[in-house]
Structure formats: structure tokens, C-alpha cells
Image (cartoon, rainbow, N blue to C red):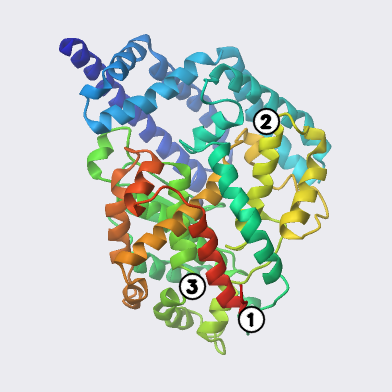
Amino acid sequence: MEETINIALSIYKDYQKQNLANKFVNFLIGWDSQTEAPNDCFEARGRQIEVLSTATYKLNTSPELVKAVQTLYENRTSLNEITAHEIVVVKKNIDKIIKVPMEEFVELSTLLASSQNIWAKAKVENNFELFKPTLKRIIELLKLYLSHLETPKLKGYNILLDEYEPGFTTKEYDEFFDTLKKELVPFVKKVATKALQYNHSFTNFKYPKDDQKKFAKKIMDTLCFNHNKGLMKESEHPFTTGFGTSDVRFTVHYHEDNLASAIFSAIHELGHATYEMQVDPALDVTLSGGGASLAMHESQSRFYENIIGRSPAFWKSLFPKLKEIFPKQFKSINLNDFLKHINEVKCSLIRTEADELTYPLHIMVRYDIEKALFNNEITVDELPVIWNKLMKEYLGVEVPNNKEGILQDIHWAGAAFGYFPTYALGSAYAAQIYHSMKKDLNIKEILKSSSTKEINEWLKEKIHCYGAAKYPQEILKLATKEKFKPQYYVTYLIKKYSKIYDIKW
Ligand code: ZN
């Protein structure tokens, strides 16, 4: 038996190496496509990517690999902990590829090749009818896809939720969003009745890109970004990518009329980048590197962006540097004006522009709709009306058109149903992690030194080092000594914003 396991293990190790090499190629192509590549290169690039994807598909489904993974899965108790976890994850993915008929897979991929363009056109033209047939077909194909993957434990929408955040189904998300509905919605309504008074003349100025870049470098220094293992560039939409722990890259986009945008997207992406860099380097040669899940990744970016990055302690040392780089714009502005500006709450229409407090309510709208769609409780035809009704109910806003309503996000056009909830969950993980961190660290004191070094170290030891070698729920429990509790998030938000808005709650 041991002989059989050893043969299977050696086949698996070969697969790991080839899979990593494929990932490396895809990482470089992706990075280049989004940062440097000239406009006309994409057709030729598409042909090469098609060949490479086919090779990856063959690699992932080769009978030899499937057999080896099955053997290792059956004998996983005799494997080391990291490999055993990895085999469970890999087997789940292989099963998926095998269970879904090839022609359905091809139809969905083909549809997705054009669906995002159709969505983009529909959005520009504010025409939901144009996107409706495509969206209907995507949902039909996804329902078909789910029918092949059902198990006694996992059915329908829960399969999608579990794909994006292992261990999370409607049971856990309902509990989470019900807490937000009950406790956060009334609080937001109260905040919305108040306005912050401050000098916001600095928002009327232009901020030259080169100066913004200088300030972005100060932020990188504060967050202790390791320039030997990573770099920053520009792209249309900010993102973070990388290969292992020694090549981590992120981008920002500078808007000359909006200084805060690049600052907070830089802190956000640096949060993702710090996570990637601080994974145990031993995992670089396995398939268990990188973040544990989407929500866990988002917890790190939002922890740095909102909990650290929008705090008075963080800006105490950085604000003078901001004034130094932008003396004209910040001439009569004090730290309090700036802090009010970056923590201002506005019940608005667009998710990506939402503030920290109202953001999860935008996600709640999407979660309710996705769940009802996959439970066959609503139809695609009804979506605009339902969207507008929920926005009114949760955020108190009237949606004037579909462009700023149901058509605003690209996700559904890419069949990414079940993805949205991870954004809100990430913020909630962050609040629970923050609660734990405060028991060990004096965060205000640490930030006085203009460096997050000790905070980074804490996160490395409690969360980052595990990479994806454990499930997110296990890591959260190890780091915070508790299972996930939505209450930490609600308490954090209400405490923070009652203070800023001077509300007794
Ligand atoms: Zn993010």
C-alpha cells in the first residue's frame, strides 16, 4: 500500500510543479495585459491563451492525475497536514470538472466571452432589456451546472456560496445579514439625518499625479512594503496579483480631482499585498500558497484600508507629510477636517463608491436578489423593480435609472453569483480580527512610529503564515479563539460612527 501511495504522491508532485508553472505564465500574461500591453495585441494574445487553457484543462483532468488524487484522498490520514488539506481541495475541483458535461462548460464559457461586452453596452445605454436575455441564459446554465454538483449536504445557491467562501452557505450568511438588517439599517438611517461640518475646500483642488505618487510611496513605507519582493504600477482598475511570496505586485489609479481615491485604494491593495508576502515561503512550492479565501483576503485589505487607514492614529504621523506634498491644497485644513472627510457617510447608489458604514447594505441587496433568483422565487424580468425596492428599504435612496441600479456591477455578467457576499464578510472578519489584535497590541501607540510593522507581524503569525493550507474558518478560529461572530462588525461600526457623528445609540 505504501508503494501505491508513494507512486501517487510522485505523480501529484509532478502535477504541482506543472500547475505552478502554468500559474506563473498566467500571472505574467495577466499582469502585462492589465498594465503594459498595447491595445491591438489582444486578438493574437487570445489565440495563445486558448492553447494554454486547453493544456491546463488537460493537465487538471488527466486520468493518471485523477487516479493519483483519488488514492491520496482515500489515504489522506497518512499524508502530512498541508498535503492532506490540499488533496481535499484539489479533489473537489477535479470532481467538479468531471461531473459537468463538456458541452455545457463550453456553452457557458462561450457565452461569457461576449456577455460582459453586452452588459457594458446595456449599462452605457441604460437599457436592461438589452442585457436581460444574456443574464437569463447565464442563470439557466448556472442552474444546470449546479444540478450536476448537488450533494446531500450542498444544493443550489449554497454550492456557489461555498465555491467562493468554503464553509459558508445561506445558513451562515442569513445569520450574518439578518444581524446587519436588524442592527445596522436603523443606525444608518439615523446617521443619514446628520451632516458633518468641516472645511472641505481641499476637495476643489487638482492633485498632480506625480505628487500623488510621492505620497503613495510614503504609504508604502508606513505599511513596510518590501520593495525586493514586490512593486507598484498604474492601471485602470486597481488590483493585486503575484506569484508566491517573492513577486507581489499591485496597481493604483490616480484621479487628479480626487486625492482620497488613490490613497485608500493603495492602502487597500497594500493590505492584499502584505497578506501574499507574509505567507510561509515554504508554501511557494505547493498549491497552498496565497490567501485562504476571497473573504479572508478582503478582510486584510479592508482591515488596513478602513480600520487602520481611516483612523486618527494612522493620520497623526502621515497628515503632516500630506501637507508637505500638497501645501497649497491643504493650507487652511487641519487633521480633523481631513478625518471627517475620509469617514463621511453618504447613502448613495453605487457600491464601489460607498463608504465603510453603508457598504455592507449594498451587498445585502445583491445577496437577497441572488438567493431569491436561485430559489426560483423571482425572475430576471422583475430584477429592476426588486433592486429599487431593496435600495429604498436598506439605504433609503431612490434609484433614478438602471445604469445606477441593477446594471452597475460587472459580476453577474461574468456568472459570478455568490461572490458579492464575500466582500461584506471580509469586513466582518476584519472587525473580529481587530477585536483580538487589540488584546495583544496597543495599536494607537504602534501607529505613532509611522510604521505598521508590529501589526504586520501579528497578522503574519495569526493569519498570513497559513496561506491557503487551512480553511478560512479554521484560521479565523485560531487567530481569534472564536468562530465567526457578526456582532463584532456591527459593534465596531456603531461605536466608530456614533463617535464621528456624535450620536447616542
Ligand atoms: Zn480587495
> For the view shown, which residue lies furthest in the left direction?
3
Q: Quarter holding the C terminus?
A: bottom right
Residue 110 placed where, x, y %? 63, 23
Image quarter hosting the N terminus: top left
Residue at 27%, 59% (x, y): give it. Answer: 457
Front tag of 1 and 2: 2
Image point 36% across, 66% down: which residue? 438
Q: Is disc 3 placed on a helix, strand or loop?
A: helix
From this viewpoint, which residue is outermost toward the bottom? 332
Residue 54 visible, this angle: no
Q: Is residue 276 above or below residue 88?
A: below
Q: Which mark is residue 200?
A: 1
Q: CA distance from mark 1 to mark 3?
A: 20 Å
Dot 1 or dot 3: first in sequence order is 1
- In the picture, measured across the screen, residue 365 lies left or right of residue 269, that is right
Mark 3 or 2 closer to N-term? 3
Residue 68 or 440: which is nearer the viewer? 440
From the top left corner, tell me how far across and down residue 32 is, in percent: 46, 42
The residue under label 1 is which amino acid type? His
**Can you tell which quarter of the image residue 77 is in?**
top left
Instruction: Give whichever of 174, 100 is nearer the camera.
Output: 174
Mark 3 residue type: Asp
Residue designated by label 2: 374
Say which residue label 3 marks. 211
Secondary structure state at the residue bearing disc 1: loop
On whether ligand 1 comes within 8 Å of the CB at mark 2, the answer is no
Q: Earlier in the sequence, mark 1 or mark 2?
A: 1
Q: CA distance from mark 1 to mark 2?
A: 45 Å
**Three-letter code, disc 2:** Phe
SS of the residue under disc 2: helix
Residue 402 at x, y percent in the picture: 79, 47
